[in-house]
Structures are given as structure tokens and as C-alpha cells.
Image (cartoon, rainbow, N blue to C red):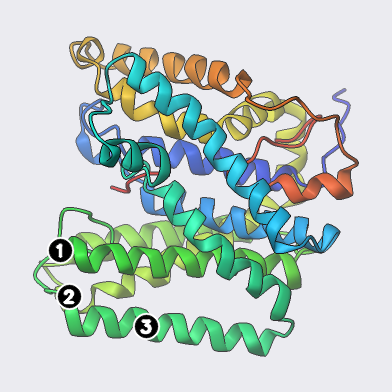
Amino acid sequence: MTVNRPVHPTSYLDLLRAVAIVLVVNSHLDEVYPIPQLGTGGVFGNELFFFISGYGLYLGYQASREAIGSWLKRRLTRVYEPLFVVATFLVLVGDAHIRSFSDFFFLYIVPLQFWFLPTIVGCYVPIYFIMAKMETKRAYAWLFGALALAYILLFAIFAEKTSWLTEHYDVQTEVTLPLRIIFYFATMVMGVYAARFHADTRGKLSDLLWLLMSIAGFYLFVGSLGRITPFEVQIVDRIPALAFLIFAFRFARYPALEQFIANHLSGLVTLLAGTALQIYLVHDFLLRQEALKAMSFPANLIVFCVATLILAILFEKVSLRPQAKALPIKRASGDVDATSVPLKPGTGHTQAS
């Protein structure tokens, strides 16, 4: 007879974070798989990360009502300490080069190769004021409406509608990048909204069906662009993408799933969630190694996964600050955003393809 293990109150956030980093990394593995199309899922992983961050940030703000100065300092430390460690490693092994202040700035301050980090840092100040000032569902409805209008107008007026650009850096970057920032900021606000008004949500098994349907709807729609569906309406792909986010959040809170994870997969989920930021920072470095490129499938995938986890664990152990003592659960809930080490015990970026 199996004895059920206790389910941590925020274990669903760790599950979502673990799934997010797997999806983000998988979206970069098109040259690893024998079928390149298997290297996908980045849009889902990205929006999960921003959603989790907004959700966790609100839990922390709700518990502490911390002033913006100290709040922002802690948030930036959580982002830039791991970045500094990994960036310095990349410089030391010759993968990155510092020949000018510009090289330093775009590696350590605004790391362009890690677009998730400067994007989420840029969201911190507006998110703080949203958490502090917006108190009603009506206010959030107005904000979501304004973001949707800005997204539609930017696309309608400035986008060259000859290819799918909403998730591609290499297609009209001057429009694609603002579109992505608006969309992912909106998903971060959705996380704040969910934590504020739907923190007690419990999922159902039917949410899994809707989750699968939203994934299928997204890929079927994107696959039809330029064939059946004109590129002029491509931003409809945001609808199934957001549906995925909603039902992923709901299904992660399905009690039977939470119990199954606690009983059988808590160690793996904890590992992936706790090293998610380090995995994001190091995985692309490993993909650039010629030795890995020379391997055939599935040996290349196995070596990549093992090496990524080992490096991520090592870098997660490196801290520039003294280790703080464990905090009570309510206080520690403020440290469960997408760039955090997860709560213990038992708990638990990126270019999309």
C-alpha cells in the first residue's frame, strides 16, 4: 500500500516551472532531434515563466508589502547573481569575449543572448505598481484591454504580414520584439491577477482535455498560416496560447496530479524547478559544442541533458552571498517567482521555436 506524501502548498508552481524549462530547452533542440520539428514548445515555456513570476511576486508582496527599493534590490540580486556566475564562466572558457564596454554591457547588464532576463527585469517596476495600486477586477480588465489594443495596433500598423513573426526573432525584429514584450508582460500580469483573485483554484481532469486542445489548436493554426490561413490574421495564435496558460495552471492544481507528483516525481520536479534559471543560462552553451554536434541521436540528447543538469547544479551551488536561514512558509512564498530557487522541502528563457 502506497502512503501518500504531503503536498506542499506551492508545489504546483514548481511543476509549472519544471515544465516551462523543459519546453524552453526543447524549443532549441531542432538540430539534436532527427526530426527538427520536435524542437518546439518555446512559446508555451516562455509564457509559463512570465506567468509564474507574476504569480510568485504577488504572493511575496501580499505577505510583506515591502517598499519598492528593497523589493527591487532583492529581485535584481536573484537575477544578476546567477547571470554573473554563468557569464564569467563563459568568458573564462572562451565562449564569450569582453573586448569593449559594449561587450561587457550586453553580457552582464543587458544580456542579449538571454533575452528573458532583461525582459523580466524591465517588467519589475510596472508590475510592482500594478500589485500595489490595482485592487479590482475591473482595473485589471482595463489593463488587459489596453495591452490587447496596443498589441493589435502595433501589428496592424507596422508589421509586414508576409510571414509568421509573432515568435520569430529573425523576422522584422523591430516589430517582433515589442510584440513579444507586450504579450509576455500581459502573461506576467495574468500571474498577478491569478494570485490575487484565483489563488484557491482547484483543477479538474477535464482541464487536461482543454489543455491538449489548446496545444493542438495552436499548432494547427500556425501550421495553416500561408497555406489556408492568411498571415494578416496570425495574431489569432495568441488565443490558443493563452488558453494553454489558463488550463496548464488549472491542471497543475488538480489534486490527483499534485498527489502523484508528490508521491513519485517530487525529486525530479524539485531539481528542474530549483535549477531552472541555471539550465536556461547554460544549455545554449552546450548546444554550441562541436563534440555534441558530432554525436548521433539519441546519444547527443542524453549527453546534453546530463551535462546541462550537472552544470546547472554546480552553478546553483555557487553563491556570492552568505546563505540565509530558511524562512517560514508564508514569508518564503515571496521567493517563488520564475527566477528563484524553490522552497524546501518537497517543492520545487529563451527563444521560442
Are dots 1 and 2 in contact, CB under 8 Å? yes
Nearest to N terminus: mark 2 or mark 3: 3
Q: What element carries label 2?
A: loop
Q: What element carries label 1?
A: loop
**What is the spatial separation of the Cα atoms under label 1 and label 3, in whole angstroms?**
18 Å
Q: Residue at x 66, y 35 (%)?
A: 341
Up-down relation of residue 338 to residue 213 (above or below): above
Q: Residue at x 88, y 50 (%)?
A: 330
Q: Which residue is drawn at 74% across and 25% down?
A: 322
Q: Is 18 or 71 nearer to us in this picture? A: 71
* Residue 137 visible in image: yes
Q: Is 223 or 74 nearer to us in this picture? A: 74
**What is the spatial separation of the Cα atoms under label 1 and label 2, in whole angstroms?**
8 Å
Give the amino acid type for the residue marked by disc 2 in the picture. Ala
User: What numbered label is drawn on residue 150?
Assistant: 3
The residue that disc 1 covers is: 172
User: What numbered label is drawn on residue 311?
Assistant: none
Quadrant where the N terminus sits is top right
Up-down relation of residue 20 to residue 127 (above or below): above
Nearest to N terminus: mark 1 or mark 2: 2
Around disc 1, counting alpha carbons within 10 Å, would you say few (fewer than 14), some (14 to 19), or many (20 or more)?
A: some
The residue that disc 2 covers is: 159
Q: In which quarter of the image is residue 272?
A: top right
Residue 147 in the image: state x and y as whole percent. 45, 80
Give the amino acid type for the residue marked by disc 3 in the picture. Ala
